Amino acid sequence: TEQDSAHEYTFKVFDSTMETLRRVRDNIDVSAVEQGVAALVSAGRVDIFGFGASSAVALDAQHKLFRLQINASAHSDPQIQAMSAMSLGPGDVAVAISQSGRTRALMDALTLMQESGVKVIGLGPGASPIARLCDIPIYIDVEENDEGYAPLPSRIAHMAVIDILAVGVSRQKGPSARAHLAKLNRGLRSLRVDADFTPDKKKAGS
């Protein structure tokens, strides 16, 4: 509320997020997770769809799968999503991310995919229209508060489920995934400065 101190709203946001994650963890369908991991590992191509706040989750999923050598792309534009849906085919996988489960443009894209034989993994509320259009729905039921001062814990919950799928894919790929990730980490070290690095403020401001 407007009367909350920094201490109060800091702890409220953390408490709300942790409670949301606990509820999602306790209710997640592990068999759906296993099916989703198997589909991702065997996919020829993975396209990830998300609008608004879900677009950030889609980009995070693309990053996680890209690191695991999966041909993945994230799309948040409805026209690009429609073209992607029409270009996917059997053997490909789509990941539909929706915090409301009722986004019309995403439902239109999923309908196009059903006609092409694409396997669809869905992250969103159970008993929602989008969940019913997915082959592998992973239900994420979060009560959202539309008041201006409320956080969005569902975004964190969706990202946690993406992490779960990425861990499952890495586990399925085994030593080859671990070797590739180690190679990436070694390469990225050259892009980082030492921990005791001190920026030259005069040079930075010139």
Image (cartoon, grey):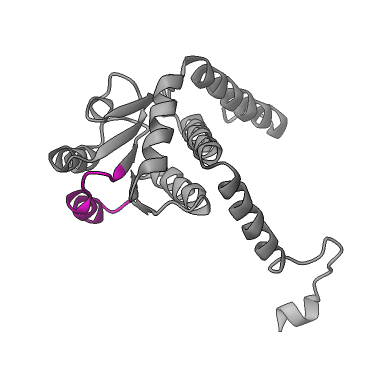
Q: Is residue 91 magenta?
A: yes
Q: Quadrant of the C terminus?
A: bottom right
Q: Is residue 123 magenta?
A: no
Of residue 182 and residue 80, the one placed in the foreground of this image is 182
Residue at image position (72%, 79%) is 205
Whether residue 204 appears in this view of the structure is: yes
Seen as rendered, the residue at the extreme bottom is: 206
The magenta region covers 76-93
Of residue 18 and residue 166, the one placed in the foreground of this image is 166
Whether residue 149 appears in this view of the structure is: no
Where is residue 197 shown, x and y percent of the image?
A: 83, 67
Compared across the picture, whether 173 is left or right of 43 comes to right
Of residue 17 and residue 11, the one placed in the foreground of this image is 17
**Vertical order, 26 against 57 (above or below):** above
Q: Quadrant of the N terminus?
A: top right
Where is residue 44 shown, x and y percent of the image?
A: 33, 50
Where is residue 5 shown, x and y percent of the image?
A: 69, 31
Residue at image position (62%, 59%) is 184
